[in-house]
Amino acid sequence: MVHENPLLSPSTLPYRLPDYARIRPEHYLPAFEWAFTEHLREIEQIATSAAPPTFENTVVALEESGRMLEDVAHAFYTVASADATAPIQQVDEQLAPLMAAHEDAVRLDARLYARVRAVHDQLDTLTLSQEDRYLVERHHREMAHAGAALDADDKARLSELNRRLSVLTTTFEKNLLADTNELAVVFEDAADLDGLSEGELSAAAEAARGRGLDGAWVVTLTLFTGHPYLSSLTNRRARERIMAASRSRGSRGGTHDNRGVLRDIVRLRAERAALLGYPSHAAYITADQTAGSPEAVEEMLRRLAVPAARNAAAEYAALQEIADRSASPHQIAAHDWAFYTEKVRAARYDLDRAALRPWFEAERVLKDGVFRAADALYGLSFRERDDLVAYHPDARVFEVFDADGSALGLFVLDLYTRDSKRGGAWMNPIVSQSAMRGTHPVVVNNLNVSKPAAGSPTLLTLDEVTTLFHEFGHAL
């Protein structure tokens, strides 16, 4: 089986990039099962060691364990978020409870926790580097936070809660993606899309053809709570339809309604938090974050609330003034906000963001903007690797070099929206950098830019340019 499954042996591609050209959906679950078994064997060796716990035989050994599982997980979850086809979604559903059970088998192992805690208790007497001390503290903190100190009955209940939550969150994501695709807004008349550029219209026509709707235009929902087209569509009803579709995802009844799923998630998270000694899920989550507590977050939001509300009221008044002077005066609604913001910006600053788009051709922004900035700031250079295949034809692979010419890793850019990709923009590792393992990073940036018709340039909005720079910052 190892020889037949490309995930069960180290990739021979540069930087250990997963061999996506050979990987099939049916390879993932057997690879995970194999990796689970191997990881548990490694954990058992650490937990049952007869030697007194030390930094090397416990913390370093724990850090080195699970390498195969990490590789398989990075390869799979990259695809599950960016190209969640029906076979991948099926694997994800089967995998969710298995992954939750495996993580608990490691994090809740009382023998392993006792050894990690013993090393942690010796920290003040050990001669460790700052990095090594952090490693001890992180593993101890993560196991304690996960519930390793609970008794057997509470651990059993915690594992059941984690299993159910893993299934629910996977169901939530599947429902959201399906409903997002179903709610793509169909227009029969191009006049309804007045204000869009030629490229945007061609993208909408291409999206319609992909759904078998020749002669129509389809606006897909690329963001969670809004849409880039809301700032330029002159037809108020068109803006309203797109906003309404965005806001109704997962909450309109039917098989993809997430309201019941959310109620169950909230209830089970609250029970889990109480089991772990926290008053709320928010307290449980923030305890291991920079904020430290929900109260700290609320205090920051309270400080922001008054000036934010005051500024929003001033913005609303300015927008309403423009709407009152329009040919059809009306009360500003949520779907009008972005459109009239552009009107105010043009009136006050003589700035038409639509006119900027020809200057924001995607290839130019990437190479003359993002990559040039990385060179100016850090001396980095980039070379596209057409010989390396990523998980989707739209994903491009670049090799990254330091100022001295030494190779640093791979950067993957997956720019375009598609029905199998979740909304928003994000960065995630495909291969993690590790001095211990001798691996260089392979990271991917995902965006949801509308793909133009074949032969047409990809013209970005100013917001998309900002997002591209932002996500590349995470990649750096």
Image (cartoon, rainbow, N blue to C red):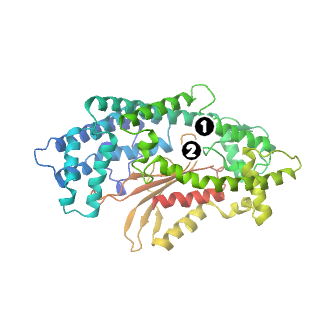
Callout 2–callout 1 Cβ contact below 8 Å? yes
Q: Tell me, for residue 13, which label it has, or none.
A: none
Label 2 sits on what residue type?
Answer: Gly
Q: Can residue 322 be seen in this view?
A: yes
Q: Where is residue 193 in the image (x, y as percent from the top left)?
A: 77, 45
Residue type marked 1: Thr
Horizontal side, residue 180 vs residue 158: left or right: right
| Mark seen at residue 423 | 2
Q: Mark 1 points at which residue?
A: 180
Counting from the top left corner in percent of width and height, residue 203 is at 67, 47
| Left or right: 316 as drawn, with respect to 430 | right
Q: Quadrant of the N terminus?
A: top left
Horizontal and vertical percent position of residue 47? 18, 42
Circle 2 residues within 10 Å: few <14, some 14–19, many ≥20: many
**Can you say whether 360 is above or below 73 in the image?**
below
- Out of 251 and 332, give the one closest to the viewer: 332
- Front residue (pair 216, 274): 274
Q: In this view, does 74 lie to the left or right of 240?
A: left
Q: Which of the marked residues, 2 or 1, is nearer the chain's N terminus?
A: 1
The secondary element bearing badge 2 is classed as loop
Outermost residue on the left side: it is 50
Question: Residue at 80% of width from left, 45% of height from top?
Answer: 235
User: In this view of the protein, which residue sits in the foreground, 69 or 309?
Assistant: 309
| Residue lying furthest right | 327
Secondary-structure class at tag 1: helix
Using the image, determine if residue 281 lies above or below residue 406.
above
Q: Which of 387 and 95 is in front in this view?
A: 95
Question: How many numbered discs, if any?
Answer: 2
Q: How far apart are marks 2 and 1 (CA)?
A: 9 Å
Badge 1: how crowded within 10 Å, few (<14), some, or many (20+)? many
Q: Is residue 394 in sight in this rendering?
A: no
* x and y, in percent, of residue 30 in the image: 33, 35
